[in-house]
Image (cartoon, rainbow, N blue to C red):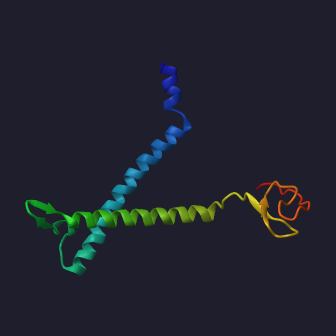
Amino acid sequence: MLKAFKEFAFRGNLIDVAIAFVLGVAFAAVVTSLVDDVIMNLIAAIVGEPSFDDLTFSIGDGVIRYGSFLTALVTFLIIAFVLFLIVQAIQKVMPAKTTTRECPHCLSEIPVGAGTCAYCGKDSPAAVPA
């Protein structure tokens, strides 16, 4: 049983996920600090409030802290935007694997390995997948 656990715990995928999780937590801490310590202070200086966390309103005995929500929303949007930029950069560096190509006769999209076009029926030498 100990051997099976060792094989499970030290598989490549599990270690990759653990590393990604730790990096994600560290990245979130950096972005939270950027939002709380820089961006929200700049926005608060423009709006006139020293902190968005102080923005509240009451309904009966309940207090709605919409300033904290605004801070969390800005944090989420910044994280989403940075992840979008990272994905865009990765896609430019590592283009997606091509699964289709044009038929040289009718210019229809056909699978890379197709020997005959499904649209025009003419022979189309199969391309070697990249």
Query: Residue 6: image x %, image y %?
Result: 50, 26
Q: Nearer the viewer, residue 107 or 93?
A: 107
Quadrant where the image shows the C terminus: bottom right
Q: Nearer the viewer, residue 4 or 67?
A: 67
Say which residue appears at 29% left-offset and 62% top-offset.
Answer: 72
Say which residue appears at 23% left-offset and 63% top-offset.
Answer: 68
Q: Going by the image, does 28 lie left or right of 90?
A: left
Seen from this angle, which residue lies furthest top?
A: 1
Query: Residue 111: image x %, image y %?
Result: 78, 57
Q: Nearer the viewer, residue 59 or 5?
A: 59
Q: Quadrant of residue 99?
A: bottom right
Q: Looking at the picture, does residue 104 appear above or below residue 116?
A: below
Q: Looking at the picture, does residue 33 appear above or below residue 10?
A: below
Seen from this angle, which residue lies furthest right?
A: 123
Q: Nearer the viewer, residue 68 or 115?
A: 115
Say which residue appears at 56% left-offset and 65% top-offset.
Answer: 89
Image label count: 0
Query: Residue 50: image x %, image y %?
Result: 18, 73
Say which residue appears at 83% left-offset and 63% top-offset.
Answer: 119
Q: Looking at the picture, does residue 10 appear above or below residue 23?
A: above
